[in-house]
Image (tube, rainbow, N blue to C red):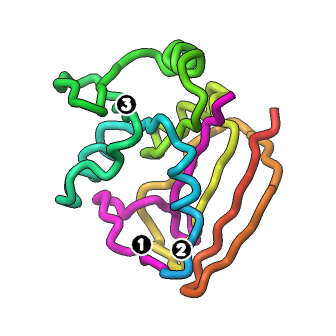
């Protein structure tokens, strides 16, 4: 059965981007080794329209050619080869998706979409790479008003000061 995973980076104070959406503070670390293994198991990527536009702004082409990507948006876009656009209810969408999928489902972001999935109980695992920076303000990862219990499964640290925490969502 596929796992529904939030995999994201934050600042130490819990922001995923600056107020204007900029992520210039994210720093690459050559010792970081988790992403390569993570993406191998991902069959489906889910994101909101703002995250989709951010990925396109990197100017490198679509970086996920092996995975099917779904963008949740109310705007009208034309589906592309491995990118589909939807405004379907996330609970019914996930029910259909899980019936068709055996690989992992990456709930990429942004925070609004992640929080909707959390609120509906549609997340199995949360993996957060915490960058060694305090932004002071920005777009928070969690805006979820409900309590969600987590079980720590792994902690890793990397050369440039990033730590990564892995949690299972406890039902």
Mark 2, residue position: 131
Q: Are marks 2 and 1 in contact (CB under 8 Å)?
A: yes
Crowding around mark 3 (Cα neighbors within 10 Å: few <14, some 14 to 19, many 20+) is many
Q: Residue at x 81, y 32 (%)?
A: 171
Q: Is residue 82 above or below residue 36?
A: above
Disc 3 and disc 2 in contact, CB within 8 angstroms: no
Instruction: Give the foreground label among 3 and 2.
Output: 3
Q: Nearer the viewer, residue 61 or 70?
A: 61
- At which x and y percent is residue 138? 41, 61
Mark 1, residues whose alpha carbon is within 10 Å: few (<14), some, or many (≥20)?
Answer: some
Q: Residue at x 74, y 39 (%)?
A: 147
Residue at (82%, 50%) from the top-left corner? 151
Numbered tag placed on residue 120 in the rendering = none
Kindly indicate the quadrant of the structure image that contains residue 73: top left
Q: Secondary structure at mark 3?
A: strand
Write down the residue under mark 3. 70
Tell me the CA gap for discs 2 and 1: 7 Å
Badge 2 marks a residue whose secondary structure is strand
Give whichever of discs 3 and 2 has the lower sequence position.
Answer: 3
């Amino acid at each position: 059965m596929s796992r529904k995973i939030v995999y994201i980076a934050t600042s130490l104070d819990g922001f995923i981007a600056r107020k204007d959406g900029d992520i210039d503070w994210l720093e690459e670390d050559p010792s970081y080794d988790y992403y390569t293994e993570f993406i191998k198991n991902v069959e489906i990527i889910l994101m909101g329209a703002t995250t989709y536009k951010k990925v396109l702004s990197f100017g490198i082409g679509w970086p996920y050619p092996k995975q099917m990507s779904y963008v949740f948006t109310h705007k009208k876009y034309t589906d592309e080869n491995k990118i589909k656009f939807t405004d379907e209810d996330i609970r019914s969408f996930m029910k259909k998706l899980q019936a068709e999928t055996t690989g992992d489902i990456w709930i990429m972001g942004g925070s609004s979409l992640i929080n909707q999935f959390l609120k509906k109980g549609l997340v199995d695992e949360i993996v957060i790479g915490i960058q060694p920076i305090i932004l002071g303000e920005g777009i928070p990862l969690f805006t979820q008003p409900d309590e969600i219990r987590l079980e720590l499964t792994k902690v890793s640290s990397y050369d440039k000061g990033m730590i990564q925490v892995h949690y299972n969502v406890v039902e």
